Image (cartoon, rainbow, N blue to C red):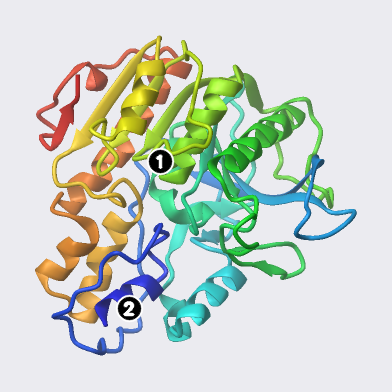
């Protein structure tokens, strides 16, 4: 079924396989031997990237057993000085990618996984001022790379972006080749509140990097210029789906987050989100709009600058990499136009990519860098699908 193929192709990073098409053929044609691609970021700087292995010793890990603590992989994306001698980073770590596809019986699709614009270990571009920092939180049973278009776009415009792999709710790979997959049972640390605690711990690690200390537990060598290059006084956060809810939770709890962005977060917390928030917060909604009581409740907590935009025809995955990758998969597998729409909605894919490149950048530029643009003032002729929800 097409739903099985869609769930198996390493593009989805979704909360659930909600795309099955009963009219689809039982099998898909073998894909052509080509690699999928991501859009090139539009910023003036090349992009570097490095992975960090982090352990939060304030949080015991009952699943791993006595003596173990909450363990995360994180990836830092940043503007680079020179990338020519540094290899491009994969969209998803090789071991995690293989495990993900093997779980669905589609290991043959591993060679199709895209590369990113990030170059592993490239030296950091230093301009005399520290880099503003953004922390990204993925969705349920997803992975760090599912919003790479957005992440590398922000990095190309001068941000350091730290993406988190939330252990027990993601496919990721640790040093030495150990692969982690979603699991941990019903009581595993996979609730939005656990994600929010991860975000706050990563903020601690950003502060260590800013102070010249390496938080990587193996103390592996970091790219030249990374230590001391981050600005702990200009930090923001964003996330998709469950990660959007976690971003809201973390922003409410931690004043170090000076601006927050939720990409279609359902705001489903137990207990519900509470407390007034006087710092800027932006919603990019699609399915989880303010017609839902939990989203409306969170909106009512916002006492500072706030904005809610929604793209006509968008679905839950429309603000992520799916909009660039699924049209390519559709050609490879011979999907019909309807099947593609069932996967990514009716929003034009090219417009969707431009939206996710432009609006988060405009928000964080305005709120962390005090760069006054006009994109967030109201509807734009350049983005006719985007409407502002009062």
Question: Percent from the top left, x then y, of residue 270?
Answer: 52, 37
Residue 153's disc number: 1
Q: Are marks 1 and 2 in contact (CB under 8 Å)?
A: no
> Earlier along the polypeptide chain: callout 1 or callout 2?
2
Question: Percent from the top left, x then y, of residue 283?
Answer: 33, 30
**Residue at the spot x=54%, y=59% of the render?**
89
Q: Which quadrant of the rendered structure holds the C terminus?
A: top left
Question: Percent from the top left, x then y, of residue 323?
Answer: 27, 55
In the picture, measured across the screen, residue 150 lies left or right of residue 25, that is right
Is residue 35 in view?
yes
Q: Which quadrant of the rendered structure holds the N terminus?
A: bottom left
Q: What residue is shown with label 2?
A: 5
Q: Choose top left, top right, bottom left or bottom right for residue 135.
A: top right
Q: Nearer the viewer, residue 97 or 142?
A: 142
**Residue at the spot x=33%, y=78% of the render?**
4
Is residue 237 in view?
no
**Residue at the spot x=35%, y=68% of the render?**
36
The correct choice, above or below, for 82 with respect to 381 in the image is below
In the picture, measured across the screen, residue 268 lies left or right of residue 296, that is right
* C-alpha span from label 1 to label 2: 29 Å
């Amino acid at each position: 079924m097409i739903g099985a193929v869609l769930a198996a192709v390493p593009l989805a990073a979704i909360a659930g396989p909600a795309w099955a098409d009963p009219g689809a053929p039982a099998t898909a044609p073998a894909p052509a031997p080509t690699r999928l691609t991501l859009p090139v970021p539009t910023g003036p700087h090349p992009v570097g990237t490095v992975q960090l292995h982090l352990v939060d010793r304030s949080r015991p890990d009952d699943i791993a057993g006595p003596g173990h603590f909450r363990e995360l992989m994180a990836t830092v994306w940043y503007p680079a000085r020179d990338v020519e001698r540094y290899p491009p980073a994969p969209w998803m770590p090789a071991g995690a990618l293989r495990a993900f596809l093997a779980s669905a019986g589609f290991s043959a699709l591993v060679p199709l996984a895209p590369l990113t614009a990030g170059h592993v270990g490239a030296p950091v571009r230093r301009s005399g001022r520290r880099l503003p920092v953004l922390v990204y939180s993925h969705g349920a049973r997803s992975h760090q790379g599912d919003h790479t278009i957005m992440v590398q776009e922000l990095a190309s415009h001068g941000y350091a972006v730290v993406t988190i792999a939330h252990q027990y709710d993601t496919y990721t790979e640790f040093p030495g080749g150990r692969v982690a997959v979603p699991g941990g049972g019903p009581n595993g640390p996979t609730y939005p509140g656990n994600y929010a605690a991860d975000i706050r711990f990563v903020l601690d690690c950003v502060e260590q990097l800013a102070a010249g200390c390496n938080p990587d537990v193996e103390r592996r060598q970091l790219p030249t210029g990374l230590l001391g290059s981050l600005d702990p006084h200009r930090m923001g956060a964003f996330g998709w789906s469950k990660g959007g809810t976690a971003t809201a939770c973390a922003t409410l709890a931690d004043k170090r987050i000076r601006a927050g962005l939720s990409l279609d977060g359902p705001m489903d917390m137990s207990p519900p989100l509470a407390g007034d928030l006087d710092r800027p917060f932006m919603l990019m909604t699609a399915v989880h709009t303010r017609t839902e009581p939990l989203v409306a409740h969170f909106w009512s907590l916002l006492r500072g600058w706030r904005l809610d935009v929604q793209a006509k025809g968008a679905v839950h995955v429309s603000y992520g990499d799916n909009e660039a990758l699924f049209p390519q998969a559709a050609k490879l597998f011979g999907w019909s136009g309807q099947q593609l729409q069932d996967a990514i909605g009716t929003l034009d894919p090219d417009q969707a990519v431009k939206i996710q490149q432009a609006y988060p950048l405009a928000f964080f530029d305005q709120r962390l860098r005090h760069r006054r643009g006009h994109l967030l003032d109201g509807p734009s002729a350049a983005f006719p699908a985007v409407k502002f929800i009062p």
